[in-house]
Amino acid sequence: MRTQRQVVDYSLRKRAVLRELLAGRVGTYDVCDASPYLKNAARFHGEPTDQRCPICRSENLTHVHYIYGDELKQSAGQARTLAELRVLAMTLREFQVFVVEVCLGCDWNHLVEQHLLGRDRLAEAGPDQSAVGVVAAAGGPTGRRRREAQR
């Protein structure tokens, strides 16, 4: 999405959990513990992926997007589809999205990423900022200072 920013990826944490599972330091029941609410959200609001479950390897994972933010009021904490996120990103100033992957077969679940969405950054990238970039590229005051500092 165009307004996505401040992305935090949890793939290293996922690899660490899977490494602990393969080493036998963590049991399957510890990592395959999706709640009934998460499984229902995956069924009705989730986005299917082409990735196989790392535990059972029989089903594809489903991504569930949970939204949080001050402007959401009662809607905070709800699961939304990607189509709904696109609409919300253009209507709300800023909200946070948590993406959770879920396997409906074995109940594996893990936080994949979190990021901010909203039109807040679109307003900041107006014509004033593009003009500053043109002046700097044309060798304006900032370009001269850089050249003098290099000498």
Image (cartoon, rainbow, N blue to C red):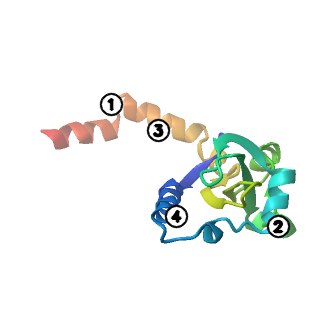
Tell me, for residue 41, which label it has, or none.
none
Of 73 and 37, nearer the camera is: 37
Q: CA distance from mark 2 to mark 3?
A: 52 Å
Residue 117: image location, x then y, percent: 68, 52
Compared with 128, 120 (above or below) is below
Residue 129: image location, x then y, percent: 53, 41
Q: Amino acid at mark 1?
A: Gly
Tell me, for residue 139, which label it has, or none.
1
The local crowd at label 2, few if under 14, some if 14 to 19, many if 20 or more residues have their Cα within 10 Å, is few
- Earlier in the chain: of badge 2 and badge 3, it is 2
Residue drawn where x is 74% and y is 48% of the image:
89
The residue that label 4 is drawn on is: 21
Compared with 58, 39 (above or below) is below
Residue drawn where x is 49% and y is 68% of the image:
24
Secondary structure at numbered mark 4 = helix
Residue drawn where x is 76% and y is 45% of the image:
47
Camera-nearest label, 1 or 4: 4
